Amino acid sequence: MNRLLADYDPFRNLELFEGLVTEDEPICSWEDFQRWFAPFKDGGCFRGHREASWNLASTLDRALLKTVAVENSAVREKLNPEENERAVLLDFQRGAHHYHAATPTPDQVVDWLALMQHHGAPTRMLDWTQSPYVALYFAVQGTSEGEAALWAIDLEWFEKRSKELLRQHHKDCPDGSDFRAFCDYMNRILLRDDNPHIIVAASPMQLNERMLAQQGQLMCNLRHDVGFSTSLLGMLIHPSVVDRQVVSRVVLKKHHRIHFLEELRRMNIHSASLFPGLDGFARSLAVNLDISLAHQVESRKEAMIQNIREFKLRHQQPQ
């Protein structure tokens, strides 16, 4: 790790975690990007954030992990994440059949949450991808010119650690070799309120077209009471401190954002390929226009500079 983990308490704050895993050198070029993900390329999961200030928080984290404060009082009360999550899930299960022909069975909790995540409902799932290039696309798409961020997790370490910790709490946890058995197990425990502070890979039985196109991997926090980053930090130091870089966050300088988008487009990574359907195609046109306008601006600047030079030459006073 680029910083010591042993001195940190996993339940303090998000800033500790992000400071702990953030790389010292930002990405400023395509070559920097390729060097950064090289240690993870044979078995990593990646995530791109358009804004470097965003932390690893699910939509449910952002919606429910808040406190209610009374003015002029030290009293703080947390809203009930478990109760609210169950209410949103039930509402979705009751109404989804009006819009989706083949809904999961009532006991397929993972598939329900994956379907909710796919359509934008708040869940405690967090979208990752096994492609660093797809993660880069999500980091640089959009018009923000500030700093973005990329995340990477060593997937082999992550899956091994999560299953080890699960078996300490749930003796009936399968070893993972039987995918269907592990899915059944996840469906049984996912909504329990006595789960350990662990992040797990949550794979639905039925992958949707978007997950396939994006090489998607869903990760899920088993606890309601703390955020994703806090649970992941706990895994880094419990039962022992990891001795190598297994989680990495790097800041991405977006001065070369257009160059990144062009490189990705040459690899057929764009909205039309990542979001199959008319919506994805329409989004891809916006990115194409973004690239085209950037080149038009540069061309216009060069022409203006040349015109100014020629004007000065024509109007120079004779010596």
Image (spheres, helix red, strand yellow):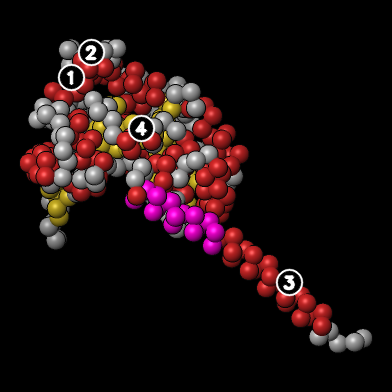
Q: Single out the mark in the foreground, 2 or 4.
A: 4
- For this rendering, which residue is in front, 130 or 205? 205
Q: CA distance from mark 2 to mark 3?
A: 69 Å
Circles 2, 1 touching at the beta carbon (< 8 Å):
yes
Residue 252 numbered mark, or none: none
Element assignment for label 3 = helix
Q: Residues within 10 Å of mark 3 (few under 14, many from 20)?
A: few
| Residue range highlighted in magenta | 279-293
Please indicate whether residue 224 sits to the left or right of residue 95 in the image: right
Q: CA distance from mark 4 to mark 3?
A: 49 Å
Residue at the spot of label 4: 212
Mark 4: amino acid: Leu
Q: Is residue 298 left or right of residue 314?
A: left
Residue at the spot of label 1: 185
Residue annotated with mark 3: 306
Mark 4: secondary structure: helix
Mark 3 or mark 1, which has the lower sequence index? 1
The amino acid sitting under disc 2 is: Pro
Amino acid at pointer 3: Gln
Up the image or down, 244 lies above or below 128; here it is above
From this view, report whether residue 79 is shown above or below residue 208: below
Identify the residue under disc 2: 174
Q: Is residue 23 above or below residue 155?
A: below
Amino acid type at circle 1 is Tyr
Left or right of 164, for residue 40: right
> In terms of sequence position, does the residue under pointer 2 or pointer 1 come before the other?
2
Whether residue 278 is in magenta: the answer is no
> Going 34% across and 45% down the picture, which residue do you hit?
277
